[in-house]
Image: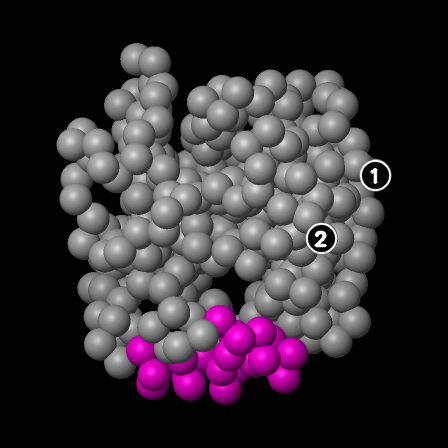
Amino acid sequence: MTARSTTFSDTTVPRPTTTLHPRDHVMLLPDGRRLGYRTHGPADGPLVLLFHGTPSSRGVWDFIEPAANALGVRAVAPDRPGIGLSDDLPNRGILDWPADMAALADELGAEQFAVAGWSGGASYALACAVELPDRVSSAAIVNGIAPLDRDGALVGLGRTEREALRLTHRAAWLAKPMFALLAEFVRRRPGVARRMIETSLPPRDRAEFEARGTAEESLAYLREAFRQGSRGVVLDYRLFTYPWGFDLEEIRVPVHVFHGEQDRTIPVHHADEFARRIPGATRTVWTGGGHMAVVEHGEELLRALTADEQPHG
């Protein structure tokens, strides 16, 4: 089946249950699944694919719009399977993602593209670098979680993240209704949910979060993660607790590792692990920044990713 895109006025796409962003799109993948994504910047700029964390969705990258326009970069943020606007792919693995991204790049008319993974999106960005070395020009890891099959990997990880990883690994059947309750709580009590999130953030992260607008607006990316229920989010967490299917040492494209110094969600030693094991990787620690430090460094991220647009096979 040939991939094709559509807008939400098209009758082939189910009516959404919430208001959608005007830059939201859906395409059909070769196997018939729908892939949802949001675009930023000019359509004729170099393509950068931006992967969200967990639990999250495409809207978490909305802050990148001014930087994308200023630099002339086409920044596109897709939803992973079972999350947001993208159809579920039961029993998927991290290495299933590159084929979807190759199809998305084809749909957007780009032979080469860069990728960035924020937080839990890191493994998906690196999977693209491993599987598509002739198409991925460079990759970035932003406050990413490194493989957990090493001593001390969980040290310093935020309590919420540690518990989510343990629960989804040991009892996915229990995690699904628990995450469903979380989604309902965020929907019904956004003000309380926002205050709870803010108490766990360092000052600069808290300021960035507050700048997103009302409680409803600031949590839109989180509500959207559960549009189809909790299955996609639970599987996302669960996959982090198993081998990714490739070794970091296999990566041969340029990789930029960025991390906030005061990240209370994923500690900076995860950035150290990436930089140590990925050949030729660069490492940048944003002084005073937390898990959301990239919001202040959008232009720096896009400049790094578009500095080298030649393939590295």
Give the residue type that dot 1 points to: Gly
Q: Is residue 291 above or below residue 56?
A: below
Disc 1 secondary structure class: loop
Q: Examine the structure image and report whether residue 192 is included in the region drawn in magenta.
A: yes
Mark 2 is on which residue type? Glu
Q: Quadrant of residue 15?
A: top left
Callout 2 touching callout 1 (CB < 8 Å): no
Q: In the figure, 149 relative to 153: above or below?
A: above
- Label drawn at residue 78: none
Precedes in sequence: disc 2 or disc 1 = 1
Expressed as whole percent of the image width and height from the top left, the position of residue 71 reads 70, 44
Nearer to us: label 2 or label 1: 2
Magenta stretch: helix, strand or loop mostly: helix
Along the line of sight, which residue is nearer the eye, 44 or 240?
Answer: 44
Question: Which region is colored magenta?
Answer: 190-212
Residue at 26% across / 23% down in the picture? 32
Q: Residue 205 placed where, x, y %?
A: 60, 76
Q: Which residue is mark 1?
A: 280
- In the image, taking residue 196 as reference, residue 246 lies left or right, namely right
Front residue of this view, candidates 90 and 223: 223
Residue found farthest to the top: 1
Which residue is identified by label 2?
Answer: 299
Camera-nearest residue between 263 and 303:
303
Quadrant containing the C terminus is top right
Give the SS element for disc 2.
helix
Q: Is residue 160 visible?
A: no
The vertical placement of 166 against 4, above or below, is below
Query: Any magenta on residue 31?
Result: no
Q: Position of residue 75 (x, y in %)?
A: 57, 41
